[in-house]
Image: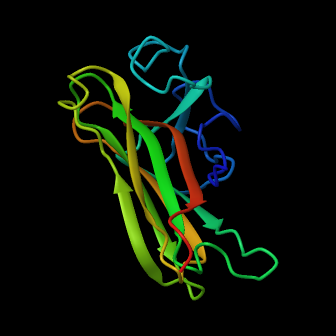
């Protein structure tokens, strides 16, 4: 089960390149993102450009701010009848996945990180995906999949997702793009 709420930019206002003030499931902490329709055209990613095979109708962009940042806090599932989860037992693995990209030869980009935190909110682990460079995209408008997998620290009780879009050069659009963001947990290994 994907723990990210609205990781596909499908919920809430949007559909154009105009910035929005809020995004369902996320707290906008800097700048103003846009939830852009794949059908918009005008140089934005289209269904014909590289991206998720099972994409919805929209994706995240950085809007027109030099730096746009969104945060989402996720509580990790608690243990079953015993109160002890796979994470508590040191057997809880996670997979963080994002489709990240940008426009043509520009270096505007998007980065997704997950910071696992203990019960006091102290960070205990960090994983970062992106940004995807213009060279990695072959100088074309595209979103490419990035994935990280590891064990969740046994003391982790929550995860903070941070989605950051950065404009690197000229122009007024922040052409960092993101879609299909997910954080999933699964037991790994045998009994200890």
Rendered location of residue 86, percent (x, y)? 61, 72
The residue depicted at 69 percent of the width and 47 percent of the height is: 24
Query: Residue 169 falls in which quadrant of the image?
Result: top left
Residue at 43 percent of width and 20 percent of height: 45
Front-lying residue, 129 or 63: 129
Who is closer to the viewer here, 63 or 141? Answer: 141
Q: Residue 168 appears in which quarter of the rendering?
A: top left
Percent position (x, y) of residue 57? 62, 22
Q: Is residue 173 visible?
A: no
Q: Residue 116 at what x, y percent from top left?
A: 49, 72
Q: Quadrant of residue 56?
A: top right
Q: From the viewer's side, name the closer residue of 189 and 38.
A: 189
Relative to residue 68, is residue 184 drawn left or right? right
Q: Is residue 21 left or right of residue 33?
A: right
Along the horizontal axis of the image, is 184 left or right of 46? right
x 70%, y 37%: residue = 11
Q: How many marks?
A: 0
Residue at x-position 57% and y-position 80% = 89
Against 7, is 27 above or below?
A: below
Residue 95 drawn at (x, y percent): 49, 54
Residue farthest to the left?
A: 135
Q: Is residue 3 visible?
A: yes
State the colouring used for the structure image: rainbow
Farthest right residue in view: 81
């Amino acid at each position: 089960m994907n723990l990210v709420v609205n990781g596909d930019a499908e919920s809430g206002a949007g559909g154009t390149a105009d910035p929005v003030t809020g995004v369902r499931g996320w707290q906008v902490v800097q700048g103003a993102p846009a939830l852009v329709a794949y059908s918009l055209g005008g140089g934005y990613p289209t269904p014909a450009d590289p991206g998720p095979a099972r994409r919805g109708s929209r994706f995240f962009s950085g809007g027109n701010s030099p730096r746009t940042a969104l945060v989402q806090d996720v509580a990790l599932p608690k243990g079953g009848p015993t109160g002890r989860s796979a994470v508590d037992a040191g057997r809880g693995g996670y997979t963080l996945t994002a489709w990240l990209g940008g426009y043509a030869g520009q270096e505007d980009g998007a980065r997704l990180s997950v910071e696992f935190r203990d019960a006091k909110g102290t960070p205990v682990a960090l994983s970062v995906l992106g940004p995807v460079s213009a060279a990695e995209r072959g100088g074309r408008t595209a979103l490419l999949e990035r994935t990280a997998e590891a064990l969740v620290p046994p003391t982790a009780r929550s995860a903070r997702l941070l989605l950051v879009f950065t404009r690197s050069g000229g122009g007024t659009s922040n052409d960092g793009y993101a879609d299909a963001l997910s954080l999933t947990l699964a037991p790994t290994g045998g009994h200890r």
